[in-house]
Amino acid sequence: MNVRLLPSNLQSYAIKECKEDPSRVPEDVAHIREWLTKQPHLKTRTDDQWILRFLRGCKFSLDKTKEKLNNFYTLRSALPEFFANRDPYLPKIQQILQLGAILPIDVPEGPKVLLHRTTNIDPSQVLLIDVIKVWSMIADIMLNEDDHGAIYGYRIIIDLDTLNANHLLQATPIVTKKVVVCLKNVYPYRLKGAYFINMPSIFESILNLGKVLVGKKLSSRITVISKDSIQSLCEHVPISALPVEYGGCGETLEELTVKWKHKVESYKEWFLEEATYGCDESKRISESYTPSDSFGINGSFRKLNID
């Protein structure tokens, strides 16, 4: 098995939280790899570490892992607006990286923190679709190398400071639905909490739609923190991890922005390779999937089997 060794404390938590049985991991990885080779419509990564990441995210349920991988590569091809043309040096991607719109934050223990910010994003210059594309790039990097988040899960802080109606015009119901499907049914992430701060009242309808789409279990993990009680964020996120600008004693936003800009740029060749993977519907043995199956106005999620 060619995988990263975990520190003993992280391995112990993986056994407890992810139902990981180290003695069975090679067998489970081999089973998933064999299954992937028998799916003519899928072209995927098949290295040990990549498969193990999906197994951990699915708590080692083989059926759920297969479903998640099928969804993951199906949507790669069905949503080119999110997953195609992800060269880190494209001007529109560089612009978003320089703004520090999506910043992962390391924590010593517990769920990893992802900070999403609308601050300084001018909707007349930066498209929401491109912000989502950069989010997908950072999400892929974490899939590839973040064992801590794979095992402990994630807490997301969404800072909506400076959000206005022009931002929301781009967050159409269909775009919102696509994002929710990717978060809930495509990426093998386990969300431990989502915290909205500096939220204007005009965003409430979008948030309410999102709650309906994610379902009762995940919506119960969403918290809105008023501007008057930002300090309460420390009840959910370690103060040692919070950026200085948020009352913590972690790295500054500028430091995090520079670090993650360089990180994404270092993945240029990886993203070029990733563009070769996906789904060829003409080779699918079962009924072919079309985007309208999941994202049409009256669409169910039946073709992706993710009700």
Image (cartoon, rainbow, N blue to C red):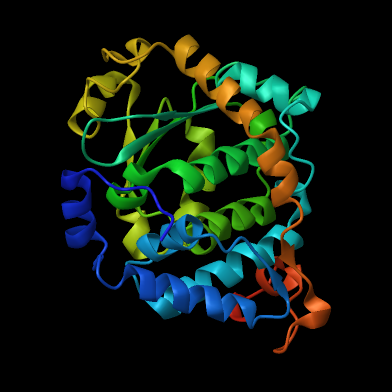
Residue 251 falls in image quadrant: top left
Whether 265 is drawn above or below 63: the answer is above
Left or right of residue 151: residue 76: right
Query: Foreground: 296 or 274?
Result: 274
Residue 299 % position (x, y): 66, 73
Whether 83 is drawn above or below 303: the answer is above
Query: Foreground: 127 or 78?
Result: 78
Residue furthest toward the bottom? 286
Residue 261 falls in image quadrant: top right
Residue 42 falls in image quadrant: bottom right
Residue drawn at the location 63% of the way across and 34% of the way down: 267
Whether 209 is drawn above or below 263: the answer is below
Residue 87 % position (x, y): 75, 35
| Residue 293 visible within the image | yes
- Quarter of the rendering occupied by the N terminus: bottom left
Whether 105 is drawn above or below 175: the answer is above
Residue drawn at the location 61% of the way across and 40% of the way down: 137
Residue drawn at the location 69% of the way across and 29% of the way down: 166
Left or right of residue 261: residue 254: left
Residue furthest toward the front? 1
| Residue 307 visible within the image | no
Residue 41 % position (x, y): 73, 77
Residue drawn at the location 79% of the way across and 72% of the way down: 280
Residue 19 % position (x, y): 24, 67
Query: Foreground: 110 or 209?
Result: 110
* Tally of numbered tags: 0
